[in-house]
Amino acid sequence: MKYEDLRKELSHKERTIKDLVSYLETRTSNATPNYNVLIGAGASVSSGIRTGQDLVSEWRKDIYEILSGKEYTTEEDSKTYLMTKEGNWYSESNEYSSLFEKKFDLPSQRRRFVEKEVDKASPSIGYAYLTSLVDSSDRYIDTIFTTNFDDLINEAFYQFSQTRPIVCAHDSSIRSLGLSSSRPKIIKLHGDYLFDDIKSTLRETESLELNIKNKFIEFSKDFGLIVVGYAGHDRSIMDVINHLLKSDDFFKNGIYWCIRKDDYISSELRKLLWKDGVYFVLIDGFDEFFSEIHHKTKGPLSIKDKLSESKQDKILSFFTTDQMGLAKSSIYIAEDLERFKKHKSKSDISDMIRDLRDVDDEEISEDSIKILLNIETLIKRGELLKAKDFADESLLHYLPINIKSYILRKIIYIYKKLKLKNEAHIYCDKLINLDIFNYEYYIVKGDTYERTIDRCKYIKENIGSFGRSVLFNNYAAVNYIKNSKYSNELGITHDDISKLLETSLKLDPSLNNNAWLISLDLIKEKYKNKKNIKLEEKKRLEVNTLIEKAKGINDNHTTYFQLIDHIVNHNDKLEKRMNNITIYRKAFDKAFLSKKAYLYRLICKVYLSFSSEVEKGFDYISNIDEFLNDSYYDKYDKKDESSDFNLLKAIISFNKNANINEYRELIIKASQCSDSISNLSNIVDSFLMQLKEPELAIEFVSKIKEEISDKQYLNAMSNIETYNNNLTEALEYIEEAYKISGDFKEYAQSKSFCLIKHREYKETVNFVCDNIVKIEEKDAAAVCKINKQLAIKLQGKDVDKNEIRNIIAKENAHSIKLACQCLLGAEVQIKRLIKVGIEYNKETIEVYKYWPVIDDVYMEEFNECNNVYSIAESF
């Protein structure tokens, strides 16, 4: 049945968008809406996700050709074949689920398919209107239910709103969700693509998980329901709605089912629309519908108030391209997009003028601005080759040097994006020819080399021309240091690098010169793995001399604080770092607000740095507790906006209050802070170890993927997949991270541990034996040797006790000693070391349980003695 037929049959049940607006506006206050929303696959089309029907057509063709052995001709022929020959599994009434299950055997395969489908999608403008309507300060909608696996709604809040929603994507996560919460709520009825248990097959969509079902019922009692983009095919939801409609206690504000003119109305939906309290509304589409609702309730969509500043350019660029032509079908969207375009143009012009004036104070003509704007627009549309051709054509005209420079940089950027190195180098040379004495142009070319060794060769060829440039000396030093970690092919010594930095500091001795910090990086690299007393003393002298010089210039400068916080200055870890806290605290009192925030975060980071490794004689928890409750820092009232602060509060909650629910809330809050990237590893570890919720870790990493380096992303995902026992995926991430970074120490530790966790014992032994000589860092070598000995032990063979005792003699780390004693089977020492670790920080017990080197028998008494652990496991 189509809309026109439905209208003839049930004209008394049709309502308009204007009617819906009046119903939405009958709320008793700004904080108490009357409606929830249920959205389906139709909401995702304008975001670039294929419809269920598109996928069904593709799968039906593939499966028909495989099973029949014939070439696909028509839809009807394939359906007839499947109904007559494959009726034991094929369902015409629910093609999507039956074909999906046939196409992919395993839940993990279905998850990966869905992940690939939704990975590149960006929420359309309709989601911006929707998130605004759910905003806690002025709510017209309470809860968003969705049958979709994609993450577009949550992503929409991340991009379009300053408010963070509560997201429930699986059965267990929904239990504690209450009606009274003012935060926007997203409930994924069939799961999330991040999880293997997405409900996508015929059997799976016949019923909702119990907790999800109960929550859907609970949230349907006092609210009406607006349904958009959902055809009503799966029984799980339709059965619940039909059942609830039998009672007057549910859907008290009615159900309004949005339908497009060309939609097919199933018999199930037709039956539902005959029931009392259920109505249908004609709409043009998801985006058009919510744009009209928003304009008639809250007015035009705000640019600045609702869009996160860090995402604003990306969002406006996506909206203003209007790839789906939404402006043609909605006057409201057209109006908002026109405002966005004007705003974006002004912003682009301002940014370009600012960039160009940094190079030259010369006035910029209107023609030049038009050229640059056109290039920017084409790039942001993804039309890179078209942008490059237009830029090339523009260079044929007379243009000032600063405009030519800007255009050439854009062409270089395009070729880098396209991974066309040779072409990028041609244009780098054209850029350099504009001014052969401009060192910045040489740095642009240097950055086009992906491998550090190639970049360093290029720098070495040109360093002689720019010996009087602070920035080029620093650029050379940074790259030379990085290269020295993995290769000595160029013959550049530490003394050579030191001379570059000395020259830089002579040219600019101020603490604004980054050479101060690069100098400590050099000292760290120069003395790594050199443990004899004389060299340690020499290293300490060099570090202290540098820091004292900086202190003499300005002991209240952020560079000075960074120098004393540098890792090379932490040999006497506890004593020096606690002394640093005293320095930060003293400066805090007279610091302006932004510096107060910086100093407070530095202190938090000092305490966080102690969290995983036992410091003898140090009461870690009491020290954190005292710091968090110190009224001295009350002058800074934005502590809870810092991920460091929330992580420290979480540690106290876990250790002192045994409150896993509070702990969970604090870790999630830390993951939502603007500085969460700086605590990526801590947050991921907490989701995995203490909370045992890898889905939250995946969600967190996915959200910040665009803001972190490829190496950070790959390392985080390898840890998550190792935890999830997905060996193949984990090893792929580990190999890719090594390919990008060249950090063999990290690679060797991660791979040997991953192999152990997945019981690949022979491969572990072979890997470590083949590569141990390549590992220069003693701590990393110790970890790999422990993993090798553990693999030997788990094969039922005798460990090399001499090698293990040798590790104990050379390493002071508590964790290394514990692992070694476990290999030796020294029960008394093992239990003593475990007890010390847990008393220092109770979070450690979950880490110890995860380590394969610690036998479960040693952990039993600690599980019984600490309620927090049993609570954590049952959560």
Image (cartoon, rainbow, N blue to C red):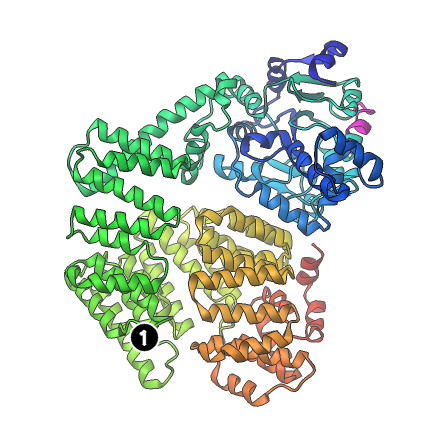
Q: Which quarter of the rendered picture does the N terminus lie within?
A: top right
Q: Position of residue 411 (x, y in %)?
A: 30, 42
Residue 555 visible somewhere in the drawing: no
Is 355 situated above or below 521? above
Q: Nearer the viewer, residue 218 or 82?
A: 82
Q: Which quarter of the rendered picture does the C terminus lie within?
A: bottom right
* Quarter of the image where one finds residue 314: top left
Examine the structure image and report whether residue 317 is included in the region drawn in magenta.
no
- In this image, 534 relative to 615: left or right? left
Q: Position of residue 47 (x, y in %)?
A: 54, 33
Residue 329 visible somewhere in the drawing: yes
Q: In the rendered image, which residue does mark 1 sit on?
A: 526
Q: Position of residue 854 (x, y in %)?
A: 64, 75
Disc 1 marks which amino acid?
Lys
Q: Position of residue 525 (x, y in %)?
A: 34, 72
Identify the residue at the far bottom of this view.
802
Is 314 situated above or below 740? above
Please report the bounds of the magenta region as a residue range: 241-249
- In this image, 362 relative to 751: left or right? left
Label 1 sits on a secondary structure element that is helix
Q: Nearer the viewer, residue 134 or 581?
A: 134
Is 859 situated above or below 824? above
Number of callouts? 1
Q: Residue at x 48, y 64 (%)?
A: 623
Is 8 situated above or below 407? above
Characterize the local packing of mark 1: few (<14), some (14-19) or many (20 or more) Cα atoms within 10 angstroms: some
Q: Residue at x 28, y 61 (%)?
A: 560
